[in-house]
Amino acid sequence: MTSLKGSQSIGDESHPFMFDRDAETMPRGNLAALQLRRLRKSLTYVYQKVAHIRRKFEAADVTPETLGSLADIAHFPFTEKTDLRDTYPFGLFAVPREQVLRLHASSGTTGKPTVVGYTRADLDLWSDLMARTLACAGARPGDIVHNAYGYGLFTGGLGAHYGAERLGCTVVPVSGGGTERQVMLMRDFGAAILCATPSYALNIAEVAAGMGVDIAALPLRYGAFGAEPWSEPMRCDLEARLGITAVDIYGLSEILGPGVAAECHVAQDGLHGWEDHFLFEVIDPETLRPLPMGEAGELVITTLTKEALPMVRYRTRDITRLSDEPCTCGRTHVRIKRVTGRNDDMLIIRGVNVYPSQVEAALIGFPGLAPHYQIVLARDGPLDAMTVEVERTGDAPGDAAACAKQAGDVQRHLKSMIGVTCAVAVKAPGEVPRSQGKAVRVKDERDGAARRGE
Ligand SMILES: [Zn+2]
C-alpha cells in the first residue's frame, strides 16, 4: 500500500505538503454536507448497536431521525467519562469483542481505567489521521521520526508510530526514559522530527546540553508535542533550545488517541481538527448549551466514522474556542485554539480560578529561573494554599538572601500575571522533578493535611 494519497510535490511554505490534500482542503460547504451524511449514519449505527447509548437517547426522547441538520446535534445526550466507567470494560463497544484488534487504556488515578478499542478499519483510520497530523506538523516521507511518546496502554506511542510509518517515515520507537541514550540516538541517526510531551522534550534538551551535545546544530527540524497542556512561552523556549519549529498536536483516547487535531507548522496558530471524521462543538460548561463559533468553552467531540467505539458528544473537559477563519496553509478544517487547561485541572485558590498552564506561562523566561516548576497544594485552615516550587539556574546565586529575594520577585510577578498570592520556594538546580513522559505539575497534599489535622 502506498503511503501518499494522490501525487504532489514535497511542498514549500506557500504550498505546504499534505498527506491527503483533497480531504484537508475540501471547501467548507462540502465538508459540512459530508459531516451531515456521516453523522446520520453514525447516530443510526450507535442507536442500533450500543444499548447504553440507546437508553440515553430514549431518556432524552431522541432517535437518529431527530437529526435534520448539523445543529440538531444539540438535542442529543452527552457521553462522559462516567459512561465508560459504568460500562467497564467493553460495554460501549459497537462490535463483538472478537472484531476488536487492539485495546488501549488510560491510567485512572482512582478505580478502573478507561478502556478503548479499535477494529481493523479504526486502526487504518488512526494511521491515516496520524500521518496527516505529522505531515501538518512538518514531517515528510523519508524523515527519521524519533518517537519518545510512551509505548504501551497509553495511545501516544503506538499512535505516532503507525502514523509515521503510514507517512513513509523511518520510525525510531524509543518510548520514554533513558534520556542520555535518547540524545545519542537522535544525534547518531539524524532525527528530523521529535515526537514527545513538551515537558519531556525539555528534559531531553537539558540532558543534551549537560552531555555537551548541541541539538540545535543537528538535523532536527520539527517537534510534534502534545498529551499535556503547554504554554506559548514554553513553545518559544523549546524552539530556542532545540533549534526547531515546535507544533502542538491534540488527541484523546476516548475519541481516537493522538491524531484528532494538529497545528500546521506554517501558521502555528490553532490546531486543525479533522472535520471529515469528527464533529467539533464548544459548549458553555455551566448551561451545557452550544456556543457560537469563536466563543470559549468546553470542547465536545462526536466521531463520524469510528466502528468499535463510536462517541456521541463526548465531553473532553478541555477549555478552548474554535475558529473557521481561513488558514495560510490552505487547509480548510476548523482550528481549535490552544487548550488553556482542563476543567478537571482548574485550581481555585482563594476564589481565583488558576490553570497550571497559566503558572507555566508566567514562569518561563523569568530571569534566573530554569523552566521547571511544580505546584504544591496544601490546606491553610479552611482555604487551599498554593506553593509554587521553582528552580534557579546554575549561574544564579544560591545563598539564602538571594533565594529569598528571588522568591519575593517571583511571588509579585505571579500575583500580577494570574492575580493570586501564593508562596514561592526557590529550589537548587535539579531539585524539581523532571518529566519522563507526562509531567506531574500539581502535587496535592490537601488530603494528607486534612487527615493530620483530625
Ligand atoms: Zn493551517
Image (cartoon, grey):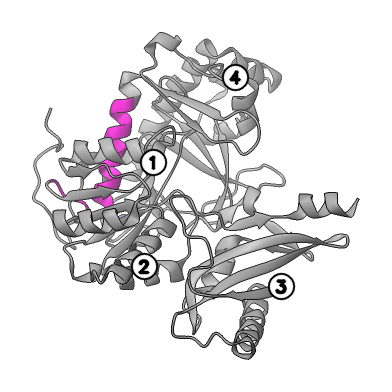
Q: Which residue is mark 4?
A: 53
Q: Are marks 2 and 1 in contact (CB under 8 Å)?
A: no
Q: Secondary structure at mark 4?
A: helix
Q: Are marks 2 and 3 in contact (CB under 8 Å)?
A: no
Residue 234: x percent and y percent?
Answer: 44, 67
User: Which quadrant of the picture is home to ligand 1?
Assistant: bottom left
Q: Nearer the viewer, residue 216 or 352?
A: 216
The residue positioned 44% from the left and 85% from the top of the image is 395
Q: Secondary structure at mark 3?
A: loop
Q: CA distance from mark 3 to mark 4?
A: 45 Å
Is the residue marked by circle 4 packed among few (<14), some (14-19), or many (20+) residues within 10 Å? many
The residue positioned 30% from the left and 58% from the top of the image is 180
Numbered range of the magenta stretch: 123-141
Q: Is mark 2 within 8 Å of ligand 1?
A: no
Q: Would residue 297 be counted in the magenta stretch?
A: no
- Closer to the chain start, of discs 2 and 4, is 4
Q: Which residue is mark 1?
A: 156
Q: Is residue 452 visible?
A: yes
* Comparing labels 4 and 1, the label whose residue is closer to the camera: 1
- Closer to the chain start, of discs 3 and 1, is 1
Q: Which mark is residue 206?
A: 2
- Closer to the chain start, of discs 4 and 1, is 4
Q: Secondary structure at mark 1?
A: helix
Disc 2 marks a residue whose amino acid type is: Glu
* Comparing labels 2 and 4, the label whose residue is closer to the camera: 2
- Closer to the chain start, of discs 3 and 4, is 4
Q: Which residue is mark 3?
A: 422
* Comparing labels 2 and 3, the label whose residue is closer to the camera: 2
Residue 201: x percent and y percent?
Answer: 37, 59
- Closer to the chain start, of discs 2 and 3, is 2
